[in-house]
Image (spheres, rainbow, N blue to C red):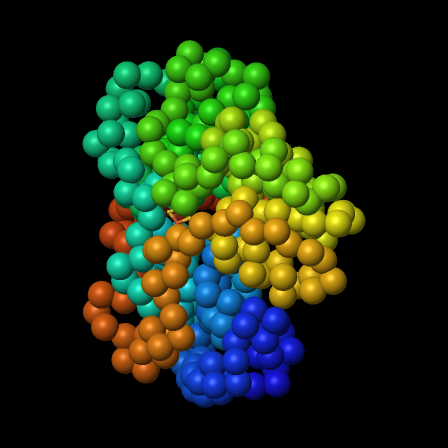
Protein backbone atom coordinates (compact mmCIF):
# COMPACT_ATOMS: atom_id res chain seq x y z
CA UNK A 1 0.00 0.00 0.00
CA UNK A 2 2.79 2.39 0.94
CA UNK A 3 4.59 1.71 -2.34
CA UNK A 4 1.43 2.42 -4.39
CA UNK A 5 0.58 5.55 -2.41
CA UNK A 6 4.16 6.84 -2.63
CA UNK A 7 4.32 6.17 -6.37
CA UNK A 8 1.57 8.74 -6.92
CA UNK A 9 -1.78 6.96 -6.57
CA UNK A 10 -2.60 8.86 -3.36
CA UNK A 11 -2.07 12.15 -5.23
CA UNK A 12 -4.50 10.94 -7.91
CA UNK A 13 -7.22 10.49 -5.28
CA UNK A 14 -6.94 6.82 -4.31
CA UNK A 15 -8.33 6.54 -0.76
CA UNK A 16 -7.16 3.97 1.79
CA UNK A 17 -9.83 1.45 0.73
CA UNK A 18 -8.89 1.79 -2.97
CA UNK A 19 -5.21 1.40 -2.11
CA UNK A 20 -5.89 -1.73 -0.02
CA UNK A 21 -7.86 -3.39 -2.87
CA UNK A 22 -5.23 -2.39 -5.41
CA UNK A 23 -2.41 -3.67 -3.17
CA UNK A 24 -4.09 -7.06 -2.77
CA UNK A 25 -4.55 -7.48 -6.54
CA UNK A 26 -1.09 -6.22 -7.47
CA UNK A 27 0.52 -8.56 -4.95
CA UNK A 28 -1.29 -11.60 -6.43
CA UNK A 29 -0.45 -10.51 -9.99
CA UNK A 30 3.22 -9.92 -9.22
CA UNK A 31 3.58 -13.35 -7.55
CA UNK A 32 1.93 -15.09 -10.53
CA UNK A 33 4.00 -13.03 -12.96
CA UNK A 34 7.17 -14.49 -11.46
CA UNK A 35 5.80 -18.05 -11.46
CA UNK A 36 4.70 -17.84 -15.10
CA UNK A 37 7.88 -16.06 -16.28
CA UNK A 38 5.67 -13.32 -17.62
CA UNK A 39 6.32 -9.69 -18.41
CA UNK A 40 3.72 -6.92 -18.39
CA UNK A 41 4.21 -4.00 -20.78
CA UNK A 42 1.87 -1.06 -20.11
CA UNK A 43 0.93 1.67 -22.56
CA UNK A 44 0.98 5.20 -21.10
CA UNK A 45 -2.80 5.52 -21.59
CA UNK A 46 -3.55 2.57 -19.31
CA UNK A 47 -5.08 2.95 -15.83
CA UNK A 48 -2.55 4.39 -13.35
CA UNK A 49 -2.88 1.52 -10.84
CA UNK A 50 -1.81 -0.88 -13.59
CA UNK A 51 1.19 1.19 -14.59
CA UNK A 52 2.33 1.71 -11.02
CA UNK A 53 1.35 -1.66 -9.60
CA UNK A 54 2.25 -4.35 -12.12
CA UNK A 55 3.78 -2.98 -15.35
CA UNK A 56 7.42 -3.95 -15.92
CA UNK A 57 7.87 -1.21 -18.46
CA UNK A 58 5.73 1.74 -19.49
CA UNK A 59 5.85 3.61 -22.75
CA UNK A 60 4.43 4.39 -26.17
CA UNK A 61 3.87 1.82 -28.92
CA UNK A 62 7.41 2.18 -30.22
CA UNK A 63 9.12 1.70 -26.86
CA UNK A 64 6.89 -1.24 -25.95
CA UNK A 65 7.53 -2.91 -29.32
CA UNK A 66 11.29 -2.61 -28.75
CA UNK A 67 11.23 -3.84 -25.15
CA UNK A 68 8.95 -6.81 -25.93
CA UNK A 69 11.42 -7.84 -28.64
CA UNK A 70 14.26 -7.77 -26.12
CA UNK A 71 12.48 -9.44 -23.20
CA UNK A 72 13.48 -13.00 -22.22
CA UNK A 73 10.00 -13.66 -20.71
CA UNK A 74 7.96 -16.61 -21.97
CA UNK A 75 4.61 -14.88 -21.59
CA UNK A 76 3.68 -11.28 -22.47
CA UNK A 77 0.55 -9.91 -20.79
CA UNK A 78 -0.09 -6.81 -22.84
CA UNK A 79 -1.81 -3.91 -21.10
CA UNK A 80 -2.86 -1.94 -24.13
CA UNK A 81 -5.09 -2.51 -27.15
CA UNK A 82 -5.28 -5.31 -29.68
CA UNK A 83 -2.99 -3.91 -32.38
CA UNK A 84 -0.22 -3.44 -29.80
CA UNK A 85 -0.52 -7.01 -28.55
CA UNK A 86 -0.51 -8.21 -32.16
CA UNK A 87 2.71 -6.27 -32.74
CA UNK A 88 4.21 -7.99 -29.69
CA UNK A 89 3.17 -11.37 -31.11
CA UNK A 90 4.63 -10.54 -34.53
CA UNK A 91 7.98 -9.74 -32.90
CA UNK A 92 7.80 -12.70 -30.50
CA UNK A 93 6.10 -15.57 -32.35
CA UNK A 94 7.51 -18.14 -29.93
CA UNK A 95 6.04 -16.43 -26.86
CA UNK A 96 2.52 -16.59 -25.48
CA UNK A 97 0.94 -13.15 -25.83
CA UNK A 98 -2.16 -12.42 -23.78
CA UNK A 99 -4.51 -9.45 -24.09
CA UNK A 100 -6.40 -9.16 -20.77
CA UNK A 101 -9.23 -7.17 -22.43
CA UNK A 102 -9.88 -9.03 -25.70
CA UNK A 103 -12.39 -6.37 -26.82
CA UNK A 104 -9.86 -3.54 -26.62
CA UNK A 105 -9.78 -2.32 -30.21
CA UNK A 106 -8.88 1.05 -31.72
CA UNK A 107 -10.85 3.32 -34.06
CA UNK A 108 -7.75 3.95 -36.17
CA UNK A 109 -6.85 0.30 -36.46
CA UNK A 110 -10.41 -0.53 -37.50
CA UNK A 111 -10.61 2.27 -40.08
CA UNK A 112 -8.84 0.39 -42.89
CA UNK A 113 -8.94 -3.13 -44.31
CA UNK A 114 -6.51 -5.22 -46.31
CA UNK A 115 -8.72 -4.81 -49.41
CA UNK A 116 -8.58 -1.01 -49.05
CA UNK A 117 -4.77 -1.00 -48.78
CA UNK A 118 -4.56 -3.15 -51.92
CA UNK A 119 -6.92 -0.77 -53.72
CA UNK A 120 -4.71 2.20 -52.76
CA UNK A 121 -1.66 0.37 -54.09
CA UNK A 122 -3.46 -0.40 -57.35
CA UNK A 123 -4.41 3.28 -57.70
CA UNK A 124 -0.81 4.42 -57.04
CA UNK A 125 1.48 1.75 -58.49
CA UNK A 126 5.06 1.76 -57.19
CA UNK A 127 4.29 4.23 -54.36
CA UNK A 128 5.58 3.03 -50.96
CA UNK A 129 3.04 2.52 -48.18
CA UNK A 130 4.02 3.87 -44.75
CA UNK A 131 1.62 2.60 -42.11
CA UNK A 132 1.04 3.99 -38.64
CA UNK A 133 1.63 1.33 -35.98
CA UNK A 134 -2.04 1.68 -34.91
CA UNK A 135 -3.17 -0.93 -37.46
CA UNK A 136 -3.98 -4.63 -37.51
CA UNK A 137 -1.31 -7.23 -38.22
CA UNK A 138 -3.00 -7.97 -41.56
CA UNK A 139 -2.75 -4.31 -42.64
CA UNK A 140 0.86 -4.13 -41.45
CA UNK A 141 1.59 -7.14 -43.65
CA UNK A 142 0.43 -5.14 -46.70
CA UNK A 143 2.80 -2.26 -45.87
CA UNK A 144 6.37 -1.34 -46.78
CA UNK A 145 7.23 0.27 -43.46
CA UNK A 146 5.57 0.88 -40.10
CA UNK A 147 5.87 4.25 -38.37
CA UNK A 148 4.95 5.65 -34.95
CA UNK A 149 4.05 9.21 -34.01
CA UNK A 150 7.61 9.55 -32.72
CA UNK A 151 9.38 8.58 -35.94
CA UNK A 152 6.81 9.19 -38.72
CA UNK A 153 8.30 12.53 -39.89
CA UNK A 154 11.82 11.07 -39.97
CA UNK A 155 10.78 7.94 -41.90
CA UNK A 156 8.51 9.76 -44.34
CA UNK A 157 11.31 12.26 -44.98
CA UNK A 158 13.57 9.37 -45.92
CA UNK A 159 10.96 7.86 -48.23
CA UNK A 160 10.44 11.22 -49.95
CA UNK A 161 14.19 11.44 -50.58
CA UNK A 162 13.76 8.46 -52.93
CA UNK A 163 10.13 8.72 -54.07
CA UNK A 164 8.06 11.66 -55.34
CA UNK A 165 4.93 10.22 -53.73
CA UNK A 166 4.24 8.32 -50.50
CA UNK A 167 1.06 6.71 -49.16
CA UNK A 168 0.45 7.22 -45.43
CA UNK A 169 -2.33 5.26 -43.67
CA UNK A 170 -4.65 5.30 -41.79
CA UNK A 171 -4.71 8.54 -39.70
CA UNK A 172 -5.98 11.46 -41.77
CA UNK A 173 -5.17 14.15 -39.19
CA UNK A 174 -1.66 12.88 -38.59
CA UNK A 175 -1.24 12.63 -42.36
CA UNK A 176 -2.21 16.28 -42.76
CA UNK A 177 0.16 17.29 -39.92
CA UNK A 178 2.99 15.32 -41.53
CA UNK A 179 2.32 16.88 -44.94
CA UNK A 180 2.49 20.36 -43.37
CA UNK A 181 5.71 19.53 -41.49
CA UNK A 182 7.37 18.07 -44.59
CA UNK A 183 6.04 20.70 -47.03
CA UNK A 184 4.15 18.12 -49.11
CA UNK A 185 0.79 18.45 -50.84
CA UNK A 186 -1.97 16.17 -49.55
CA UNK A 187 -3.47 14.10 -52.33
CA UNK A 188 -0.64 14.87 -54.77
CA UNK A 189 2.58 14.00 -52.94
CA UNK A 190 1.26 12.49 -49.72
CA UNK A 191 -1.70 10.18 -50.26
CA UNK A 192 -3.64 9.80 -47.03
CA UNK A 193 -6.54 7.74 -45.69
CA UNK A 194 -9.66 8.86 -43.80
CA UNK A 195 -9.17 7.13 -40.42
CA UNK A 196 -9.27 9.10 -37.16
CA UNK A 197 -8.66 8.47 -33.49
CA UNK A 198 -11.94 8.99 -31.62
CA UNK A 199 -10.01 10.59 -28.77
CA UNK A 200 -7.77 13.07 -30.58
CA UNK A 201 -10.12 14.20 -33.34
CA UNK A 202 -12.49 15.70 -30.74
CA UNK A 203 -10.17 18.38 -29.29
CA UNK A 204 -11.22 21.90 -30.29
CA UNK A 205 -8.65 24.45 -31.38
CA UNK A 206 -10.78 27.38 -30.11
CA UNK A 207 -10.16 26.36 -26.46
CA UNK A 208 -6.39 26.87 -26.75
CA UNK A 209 -6.54 30.69 -26.59
CA UNK A 210 -8.82 30.50 -23.56
CA UNK A 211 -6.38 28.26 -21.66
CA UNK A 212 -3.50 30.61 -22.49
CA UNK A 213 -5.49 33.49 -21.03
CA UNK A 214 -6.38 31.64 -17.82
CA UNK A 215 -2.94 30.09 -17.28
CA UNK A 216 -0.28 32.62 -18.32
CA UNK A 217 2.92 30.95 -19.49
CA UNK A 218 1.27 27.54 -19.95
CA UNK A 219 3.12 25.22 -22.35
CA UNK A 220 0.63 23.35 -24.48
CA UNK A 221 1.66 20.00 -25.94
CA UNK A 222 -0.52 18.13 -28.43
CA UNK A 223 -0.42 14.62 -29.79
CA UNK A 224 0.24 14.35 -33.54
CA UNK A 225 -3.21 12.73 -34.00
CA UNK A 226 -4.90 16.10 -33.22
CA UNK A 227 -6.24 18.35 -35.97
CA UNK A 228 -3.88 20.63 -37.95
CA UNK A 229 -5.91 23.65 -36.73
CA UNK A 230 -5.09 22.77 -33.13
CA UNK A 231 -1.52 21.70 -33.84
CA UNK A 232 -0.84 25.13 -35.38
CA UNK A 233 -1.62 26.79 -32.02
CA UNK A 234 0.41 24.70 -29.58
CA UNK A 235 4.02 24.81 -28.36
CA UNK A 236 4.97 21.22 -29.10
CA UNK A 237 3.62 18.37 -31.21
CA UNK A 238 4.71 14.76 -30.99
CA UNK A 239 4.07 11.28 -29.66
CA UNK A 240 3.52 10.50 -25.99
CA UNK A 241 7.20 9.73 -25.34
CA UNK A 242 8.25 13.05 -26.90
CA UNK A 243 5.67 14.89 -24.80
CA UNK A 244 6.98 13.37 -21.56
CA UNK A 245 10.54 14.19 -22.62
CA UNK A 246 9.54 17.81 -23.27
CA UNK A 247 7.96 18.13 -19.80
CA UNK A 248 11.04 16.61 -18.19
CA UNK A 249 13.52 18.91 -19.93
CA UNK A 250 11.70 22.26 -19.73
CA UNK A 251 10.53 24.62 -17.00
CA UNK A 252 7.15 26.30 -17.20
CA UNK A 253 4.50 27.43 -14.70
CA UNK A 254 1.93 25.03 -16.19
CA UNK A 255 1.78 22.25 -18.76
CA UNK A 256 -1.27 21.14 -20.68
CA UNK A 257 -1.14 17.76 -22.45
CA UNK A 258 -3.75 17.54 -25.21
CA UNK A 259 -4.14 13.78 -25.45
CA UNK A 260 -5.66 10.80 -23.66
CA UNK A 261 -6.04 11.45 -19.90
CA UNK A 262 -3.67 8.62 -18.92
CA UNK A 263 -0.64 10.60 -20.02
CA UNK A 264 -1.57 13.53 -17.78
CA UNK A 265 -2.00 11.18 -14.80
CA UNK A 266 1.36 9.59 -15.49
CA UNK A 267 3.00 13.02 -15.82
CA UNK A 268 1.52 14.09 -12.47
CA UNK A 269 2.98 10.99 -10.82
CA UNK A 270 6.39 11.34 -12.47
CA UNK A 271 6.75 15.09 -12.01
CA UNK A 272 4.95 15.94 -8.74
CA UNK A 273 6.76 19.27 -8.58
CA UNK A 274 5.18 20.51 -11.86
CA UNK A 275 1.67 21.88 -12.45
CA UNK A 276 -0.63 20.30 -15.01
CA UNK A 277 -3.77 21.71 -16.57
CA UNK A 278 -6.13 19.18 -18.09
CA UNK A 279 -7.75 19.17 -21.50
CA UNK A 280 -7.92 15.45 -22.01
CA UNK A 281 -10.30 12.68 -23.12
CA UNK A 282 -10.54 9.05 -22.07
CA UNK A 283 -10.01 6.31 -24.63
CA UNK A 284 -12.73 3.72 -23.98
CA UNK A 285 -10.55 0.98 -25.47
CA UNK A 286 -7.49 1.76 -23.37
CA UNK A 287 -9.51 1.78 -20.16
CA UNK A 288 -10.97 -1.71 -20.75
CA UNK A 289 -7.96 -3.36 -19.10
CA UNK A 290 -8.03 -3.52 -15.32
CA UNK A 291 -6.16 -5.40 -12.60
CA UNK A 292 -8.82 -8.12 -12.37
CA UNK A 293 -8.49 -8.77 -16.10
CA UNK A 294 -4.70 -9.03 -15.78
CA UNK A 295 -5.06 -11.45 -12.86
CA UNK A 296 -7.54 -13.57 -14.85
CA UNK A 297 -5.17 -13.63 -17.83
CA UNK A 298 -2.36 -14.94 -15.62
CA UNK A 299 -4.49 -17.43 -13.67
CA UNK A 300 -6.55 -18.97 -16.43
CA UNK A 301 -6.65 -16.97 -19.66
CA UNK A 302 -9.80 -17.39 -21.76
CA UNK A 303 -9.20 -18.45 -25.35
CA UNK A 304 -10.19 -14.97 -26.54
CA UNK A 305 -7.27 -13.45 -24.58
CA UNK A 306 -4.65 -15.50 -26.46
CA UNK A 307 -3.21 -13.59 -29.39
CA UNK A 308 -2.54 -15.55 -32.55
CA UNK A 309 -1.33 -14.08 -35.83
CA UNK A 310 -1.23 -16.41 -38.87
CA UNK A 311 2.40 -17.19 -39.76
CA UNK A 312 2.30 -15.77 -43.32
CA UNK A 313 0.87 -12.46 -42.04
CA UNK A 314 3.33 -12.34 -39.13
CA UNK A 315 6.35 -12.79 -41.43
CA UNK A 316 5.31 -9.97 -43.79
CA UNK A 317 4.23 -7.67 -40.95
CA UNK A 318 7.54 -8.27 -39.15
CA UNK A 319 9.44 -7.25 -42.27
CA UNK A 320 7.56 -3.91 -42.29
CA UNK A 321 8.26 -3.39 -38.56
CA UNK A 322 11.91 -4.30 -39.06
CA UNK A 323 12.09 -1.69 -41.83
CA UNK A 324 10.87 0.89 -39.28
CA UNK A 325 13.73 0.06 -36.94
CA UNK A 326 16.19 0.35 -39.86
CA UNK A 327 14.84 3.66 -41.15
CA UNK A 328 14.54 5.12 -37.65
CA UNK A 329 18.21 4.18 -37.18
CA UNK A 330 17.38 1.94 -34.29
CA UNK A 331 19.80 -0.78 -33.31
CA UNK A 332 17.21 -3.23 -32.00
CA UNK A 333 17.91 -6.76 -33.16
CA UNK A 334 14.69 -8.56 -34.09
S1 LIG B 1 -6.39 6.71 -28.11
FE1 LIG B 1 -7.12 6.67 -30.22
S2 LIG B 1 -5.42 5.70 -31.36
FE2 LIG B 1 -5.12 5.22 -29.17
S3 LIG B 1 -6.17 3.26 -28.87
FE3 LIG B 1 -7.64 4.88 -28.35
S4 LIG B 1 -8.78 5.15 -30.29
FE4 LIG B 1 -6.89 4.07 -30.81
User: Residue shown at 36%/43% (left/top)?
Assistant: 198
Quarter of image, res 126:
top left
Task: Name the quadrant of the N terminus.
Answer: bottom right
Q: Position of residue 7 (x, y in %)?
A: 62, 74
75 vs 304, left or right, is right
Residue at image location 69% in from the left, 56% down from the top = 275
Q: Quadrant of residue 233?
A: top right
Visible in this render: residue 185?
yes
Q: Position of residue 122 (x, y in %)?
A: 26, 19
Q: Residue at x 42, y 54 (%)?
A: 282
| Residue 280, x across and y down, in percent | 50, 49
- Residue ranking furthest to the right: 251
Residue 72 visible to an observer of this rendering = no
* Count of numbered marks: 0
Q: Residue at x 28, y 80 (%)?
A: 300
| Left or right of residue 283: residue 241 | right
Position of 147 relative to 191 (above/below):
below
Above or below for 28 versus 196: below
Q: Position of residue 18 (x, y in %)?
A: 47, 81
Q: Nearer the viewer, residue 319 or 260?
A: 260
Left or right, 119 with reference to 20: left
Asked if residue 17 is positioned above or below residue 73 in the image, the reply reads below
Amino acid sequence: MDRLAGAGLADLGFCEKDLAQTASLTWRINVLKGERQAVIPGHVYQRPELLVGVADFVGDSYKLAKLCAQSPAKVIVFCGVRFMAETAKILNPEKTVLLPAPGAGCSLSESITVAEVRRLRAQHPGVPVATYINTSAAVKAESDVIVTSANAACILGRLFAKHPKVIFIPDELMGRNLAAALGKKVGEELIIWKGTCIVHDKFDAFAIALYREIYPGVRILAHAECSPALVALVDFVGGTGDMMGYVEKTRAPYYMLVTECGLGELARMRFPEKNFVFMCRLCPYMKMTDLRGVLRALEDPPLSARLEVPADIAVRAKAAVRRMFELAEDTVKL
